[in-house]
Image (tube, rainbow, N blue to C red):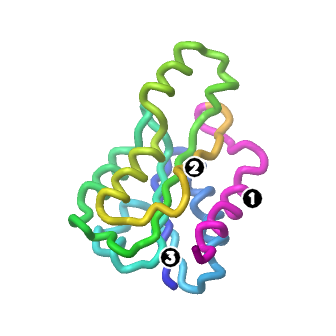
Amino acid sequence: MKALVVYDSVFGNTEQVAQAMGRGLAQLGDVETRRVTDVEPQDLTEVDILVVGSPTRGFRPTPATKKLLKRIPAGGLDGVRVAAFDTRFSVEETQSGILSFLVRLFGYAAGPIAGRLEKEGGDLVAPPEGFIVEGTEGPLRQGELERATNWARRIAEPE
């Protein structure tokens, strides 16, 4: 099987999560982890498993991530197992009612990513997942890299 983990990263946290996922998928044999700007739409259609992640910026994926996803040809992910993730802050820890309301209203980056992957024919094999960043720029919460590796291993398991 061939797997590709595609990510964008602003402060390096999402990149760390993506690299951990690549290690988790290594049991498949052929695994690449690449920044979104180093990927063309046809690269996404030539894999068995595709994982796409972005930091949550303004409740959405980064512009570079959205641009790549919009360029996937219609039905281009038919037969591809897909999953989506993001990095985010813990809204519970902010104890902000307004922020909690906005998150409930708009969500995080992984949801729209998963929706787009499914729209183009991908078979969503796991619910969108978020990995917690402490503060605005990080670091990742302790244990998140191990959790990312394990999450990716579950994606790789046969259905």
Where 113 falls versus 124 (above or below)?
above
Please state the extent of the stretch shown in magenta in the rendering: 136-159
**Magenta highlight on residue 92:** no
Residue farthest along the front direction in this orientation: 159
Residue farthest along the right direction in this orientation: 142
Q: Amino acid at mark 2?
A: Glu
Q: Which mark is residue 6?
A: none
| CA–CA distance in space, label 2 to label 1 | 14 Å
Q: Which mark is residue 3?
A: 3
Q: Secondary structure at mark 2?
A: strand
At 50% from the left edge and 67% from the top edge, which residue is drawn? 5
In this figure, which residue is indicated by the disc labeled 1?
146
Q: Position of residue 119 (x, y in %)?
A: 30, 57
At 57% from the left edge and 44% from the top edge, which residue is drawn? 87
Closer to viewer: mark 2 or mark 1: 2
In the image, taking residue 48 as reference, residue 77 lies left or right, namely left
| CA–CA distance in space, label 2 to label 3 | 18 Å
In the image, taking residue 74 as reference, residue 33 lies left or right, namely right
Would you call the spot at circle 3 few (<14 residues within 10 Å), some (14-19), or many (20 or more)? many
At 53% from the left edge and 47% from the top edge, which residue is drawn? 86
Question: Residue 43: which quarter of the image?
Answer: bottom left
Task: Depth check: give the residue in front, 79 or 48.
Answer: 79
Q: Amino acid at mark 1?
A: Glu
Tell me which label, 2 or 3, sits earlier in the chain.
3
In this figure, which residue is indicated by the disc labeled 2?
129
Task: Depth check: give the residue in front, 23 or 2.
Answer: 2
Tell me which label, 3 or 1, sits earlier in the chain.
3
Where 144 falls versus 153 (above or below)?
above
